[in-house]
Amino acid sequence: MIRYLIKNNFKIMFRSAVNILLFVLCPIVVSAVLISAFSSLMESYEPAEEFQVGYRIDKDSSYGEYMNMLKNVGDENGVTFVEYDKGDIEELIHQHELGGFVEFKGDSYKVYEINDRKVEGATLEYMMSAFFNSYLSGDIKDISLNIEKSEYAPAINSTDYYGIIYIVYFGWCAIVCAAGLFSNEKKNRIGERLQVSNLSVFQIYLARLIPIVTVVAIGICIAAVVSAFMMGVHWGNIAISVVVILLMIIAATASEMMIYEVTGSMVATIIISFGMVWILGFIGGSFETYMFSPYPESLKQLSPVYHGNRALTELSSMGESDYVLSSIIYSTVLIFVSSFISLIAGKLRRNGR
């Protein structure tokens, strides 16, 4: 009996082809727009290992005697000094793509730098300070910048970020796929017939849950594959990513079915579900990247969307993530709690309460 009901529910859902198509097209279209819009914002800047620096020195400057030594120190540290006697300094920096500029006048010097090359500017300032401090102390033989690269999380680009997080976001909108099924049940009073059948509340629950999860998962999977081939979205560990996404789809379906069981209204379910998903997505990085989000970490941790986004994007950029476990636990707890409440509500309704 339950197999027949599951099969029948599949047929009803596939009649609402537009709802299913939304799960394929929406993630692709929305992510494509945002990838294009925010590509430059999420680009990571990589400073050059070697760069040129312009300088200008007055004839009466006391620094003239140090220039040869300063150039040698610069060469040893990947900084090449090039003299420019004439021209506006800022124009020279942009025209010759200089990492900075030093102007020597009398007994002082001034370092110029540009906003989009802060790393080179800071390197130049440090080298100038180290050089003259070493000169005053009488130890100018071995000046090294001693730049150490600390460990950090590799940056993720807009293609991978938005191509992944909108798979998550639309996976949480699973109730859209169930609209046709629940509307048909209301129209034909199937729910009332099932209450007097020999099927248990749990069997009726599974007969709804399985088709919804399956159809949503298929649509999301197609969207992910198309995004990977058409836009170059890079998924990290595919097997783990599939587990994380599938559990989130089940959690989303279970929690939204719980709302439907409690309210008994499809309209109320969609409004509450969409409001809930929007808020969780807003906090969890669906609209503003969680890296740039001003919200406290404690607030983000409350959103299951954040755990899923973080797990999948870190799998993409680093190949591993500490948030995989928390996402799986969060989804599992939601599945069991939502299912339990749905079953209680179903039993109360069957008993006429």
Image (spheres, rainbow, N blue to C red):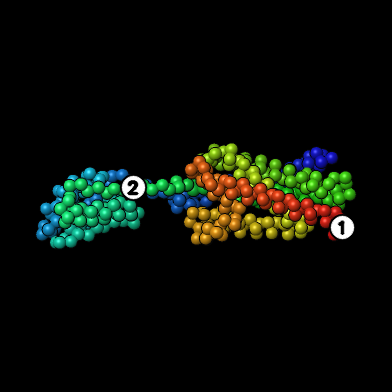
Is residue 42 left or right of 68 when viewed as pictured?
A: right
Q: Is there a contact, CB below 8 Å, between mark 2 and mark 1?
A: no
Q: Nearer the viewer, residue 157 or 36?
A: 157
Q: Amino acid at mark 1?
A: Gly
Q: Residue drawn at (70%, 42%), measured in percent from left and top?
A: 214
Q: Amino acid at mark 2?
A: Glu
Is residue 209 left or right of 27 when viewed as pictured?
A: right
Q: Nearer the viewer, residue 243 or 86?
A: 243
Label 2, on which residue?
Answer: 148
Residue 341, image x and y in percent? 75, 54
Label 2 residue SS: loop
Is residue 206 left or right of 194 when viewed as pictured?
A: left
Q: Nearer the viewer, residue 313 or 152?
A: 152
The count of marks equals: 2
Q: CA distance from mark 2 to mark 1?
A: 71 Å
Q: Residue drawn at (43%, 48%), measured in percent from left and top?
A: 152
The correct choice, above or below, for 188 with respect to 243 in the image is: below
Label 1, on which residue?
Answer: 352
Q: Residue drawn at (55%, 48%), measured in percent from left and top?
A: 323
Q: Which mark is residue 262?
A: none
Residue 140 appears in the figure: yes
